[in-house]
Image (spheres, helix red, strand yellow):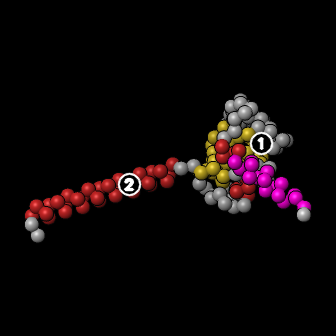
Amino acid sequence: MHPVRKKRILVISSIIIVLSLALALVMYALQQNINLFYSPTQIASGEAPEGVILRAGGMVVEGSVHRDNKTLAVSFDVTDFGEKVRIEYKGILPDLFREGQGIVAQGKLNSEGTLIASEVLAKHDEEYMPPEIAEALEKSKLNSASSNTSY
């Protein structure tokens, strides 16, 4: 083989190896930072993985908020009008947090199916709802409407 051709093949293969390594590192970094959204129905059915950071959201169930008087710990239920999921959080809740309000919580699911939240976000006005929550609520309403229909 001609030395010039050999050198070109070596350069091209080196570039391919470096680009492959860079792509692998980018994919690994993205995999570590992704937070998937799960509805309460998906969590209750076991679709959400345990011990992985995820987001869950829905409407705070009326009468489900329990606050610890000595600490900042609070627990509450969230529903998509199909299933309920318990969320436990230690910290200061957003000013807009209240029962009947749409929220998104980020945290890890434990073995009992409770989301241990590291962050709780409340919607900022009466009109806005995150697209994931709106879609999950709409699906849940359609499913409950079709199961209540008698033929």
- Mark 1 element type: strand
Q: Which residue is mark 1?
A: 60
Left/right placement of residue 28 relative to residue 78 reads left
- Mark 2 element type: helix
Q: Find out whether residue 137 is within the magenta segment.
A: yes
Q: Name which residue lies at 66% across and 46% down.
A: 132
Q: Which class describes the residues within 10 Å of circle 2: few (<14), some (14-19), or many (20+)?
A: few
Q: CA distance from mark 2 to mark 1?
A: 41 Å
Q: Name which residue lies at 66% across and 60% down.
A: 47
Q: Which residue is mark 2?
A: 23
Residue 15, position as x, y percentages in the image? 26, 56
- Which sits earlier in the primary sequence, circle 2 or circle 1? 2
Residue type, label 1: Val
Q: As displayed, is residue 123 above or below residue 136?
A: above
Q: Find out whether residue 2 is within the magenta segment.
A: no
Residue type, label 2: Leu
- Asked if residue 130 can be seen in this view, the reply is yes
* Quadrant (top left, top right, bottom left, bottom right) of the C terminus: bottom right
Highlighted range, magenta: 135-150
| SS assignment for the magenta stretch, majority | helix
* Quadrant (top left, top right, bottom left, bottom right) of the N terminus: bottom left
Residue 108, position as x, y percentages in the image? 63, 51
Q: Name which residue lies at 70% across and 56% down.
A: 43
Would you say the residues marked 2 and 1 are in contact, meaning their CB atoms lie under 8 Å apart?
no
Q: Which class describes the residues within 10 Å of circle 1: few (<14), some (14-19), or many (20+)?
A: many
- Asked if residue 85 can be seen in this view, the reply is no
Which disc is residue 7 wearing? none
